[in-house]
Amino acid sequence: MSSQCPPKNAWPELVGKNGDYATSVIEKENRKVDAVVILDGSPVTADLRCDRVRVIVNSKNIVVRVPVAG
């Protein structure tokens, strides 16, 4: 899914980092996206949007999945 959204569209290096820190890094590296922190297990829409990055975190606000555009 993320390969449809250029230029940088995935941030594997942010897994294990603080969710708020991750959103700031993502938005700095790709100014065309809005990064949003989402609690793991929360319902989300299935639509593809290259201007959105979901940062999935656990209850301690730690990123638990690779954030990708889409």
Image: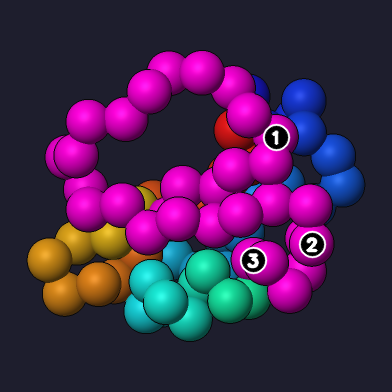
Decide: few, some or many residues near mark 2? Use Cα within 10 Å; few <14, some 14-19, many ≥20: few
Residue that appears at 61% across and 54% down = 34
Residue 61 disc label: none
Q: Is residue 37 above or below residue 1?
A: below
The kind of residue on which mark 3 rests is Ile
For marks 1 and 3, the one nearer the N-term is 3
* Residue 37 figure quarter: bottom left
Specify the segment rendered in magenta.
26-55
Report, in whole angstroms, how far the alpha carbon at label 1 lies from the one at label 2. Answer: 12 Å
* Residue 44 figure quarter: top left
Foreground label between 3 and 2: 2
Residue for badge 2: 31
Label 2 sits on a secondary structure element that is loop
Residue for badge 3: 26
The kind of residue on which mark 2 rests is Arg
Residue that appears at 28% across and 60% down = 57
Instruction: Please give left or right for residue 56 compared with residue 3 in the image.
Output: left
Residue for badge 1: 50
Residue sticking out furthest to the top: 47
The kind of residue on which mark 1 rests is Cys
